[in-house]
Amino acid sequence: MPALSVFDMLKVGVGPSSSHTLGPWRAVQRWLGELAEEMPLHTVERVHIDLYGSLALTGRGHCTDQALCLALLGLDPETVPVERIPSLIADLHSHQRISLGGAPAIPFDPVSDIAYNKAERLAGHANGMRCTAAAGDRTCASVYYSVGGGFVVKAGETEDSGAEVSLPYPGRRPLDVLGHCTRDGLKLAEMVRANEQAWRSLSEVEARLRQIWHVMRDGAYRGCHTEGTLPGGLGVQRRAARLNRTLFGLGAGEPRPYVHAEEWIAAIRSRTWSFQQVLRWVSAFALAINEENANLGRVVTAPTNGAAGVIPAVLLYHVCFAEEPVSEAALFDFLMVAGEVGTLFKKGATISAAMGGCQAEVGVSSAMAAAALAEARGATVPQALMAAEIAMEHHLGLTCDPIGGLVQVPCIERNTMGAVKAINAAELALEGDPTQAKVTLDEVIETMRQTAADMSDRYKETSQGGLAVNVSVRIAEC
């Protein structure tokens, strides 16, 4: 596998799923670019997309069809106006016409031109899709796999097909990272900062980190101030806004004492909260992000959309309740450490729920957040890695069983659990002696990989096991 940047693990995108929404979106964008080299886009008469495996089984609930449509319309997940997504999709269903790269419009019916092959699974990965274009009697088809976290691999490629970058501190395992930091007397964030500059300048690194923090912060603010029912048919009520009101002692409709996210955070910091109230705030932060995610809002894939609430919740916990104000530089360090730990799981196991269940999503995110919080609170590098190990150790075997194929139940609440576990893991590690630990992060990552391989496919984002078959609901669609 080529070297991974923290920005491979922390991506700005649109909910509800990195593997089922962001990945297919990026796959279609890539396909259109490659198609233009084989077949002039103005000659294309029809396009058709086949989904397989988990993409077919939970694609509607995960809004895969909408992601494919938006990609074909030429829109990008980082910049698409999310408030316009429902009208854009409705217009396409009504007019059934698309223009590929500015070429003359051609017929496209999302109902018939996107096929869900639920009984078939392609050999390369559980999330497979085939894109086909026809011009006269000629067809061009390509197969892509959405391998988790928004990563896309074309059939015939491997994940190590990308160009390698020469890093000052390369590594595939936690033991490699520990060795670099020990030898050169570095904190994790210092090591990561040096590596990131192999890809881009320090100012560019900081600009991207700032964007990620702003998306996380603003998503939590929106989620904590938006009432209503989430789409999809399950009738899931948003809860973050009610928690926010209750904690501030505000009645329904009562004006809030702040007007934007920074003032909101300042208002939280200005008060003294009990342990129970702090716990509720952590839940509110996580709920808010994942309610936005479920509503096709803009979030940070961290390392997946289904787990998008864990890292922001833990970071906001640190920002809102630390004794001293948290500087922007400290925010950046937190995100870099989290991203680096995510790369270790990506290299050594998986971040795809379709391959490893929810241990690969919320479990990995909890480990990322735990290490980042521990270092932010003054942990040594061994203690920070210990925090990641503790968090993942207690997510091993966690299944992915979304009810109705939606990233809502149990996914939204599960992010609150991952956030709380991350905080607990960081506290345990700060008081712990890594030389006395019985389990290392290297060992827990390998155990997670083996557990993923042993887990039945029913529990890997197929909605064919667990709560998805034991809770009686009508099959929902996004």
Image: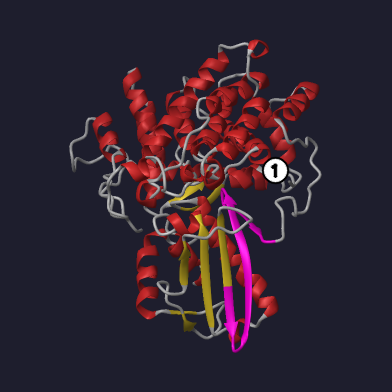
- Horizontal side of 233 relative to 332 (left or right) equals left
Q: Pick whichever, 219 or 234, lies toward us.
A: 234
User: What is the secondary structure assignment of the residue under circle 1?
Assistant: helix
The secondary structure that most of the magenta stretch takes on is strand
Q: Pick whichever, 67 or 224, lies toward us.
A: 67
At a point 63% along the width and 36% down the height, the residue shown is 345
How crowded pointer 1 is (Cα within 10 Å; few <14, some 14-19, many 20+) is rated as some
Return the residue at label 1. 202
> Split into 4 quadrants, where in the image is the C terminus?
bottom left
Whether 24 is among the magenta residues is no
- Residue found at the far bottom of this picture: 136
In this rendering, the answer to whether 197 lies above or below 42 is above
- Horizontal side of 127 relative to 297 (left or right) equals right
Give the percent coordinates (x, y) of residue 443.
66, 26
Give the percent coordinates (x, y) of residue 168.
80, 37
At a point 49% along the width and 36% down the height, the residue shown is 362
What residue range appears in magenta? 132-155
Image quarter for residue 123? bottom right
At a point 65% along the width and 77% down the height, the residue shown is 36
In this rendering, the answer to whether 162 lies above or below 383 is below
Give the percent coordinates (x, y) of residue 114.
46, 70
Give the percent coordinates (x, y) of residue 177.
73, 29
Q: How is the image coloured?
A: secondary structure
Please name the amino acid that badge 1 sits on: Leu
Res. 273 visible in picture: no
Res. 191 visible in picture: yes
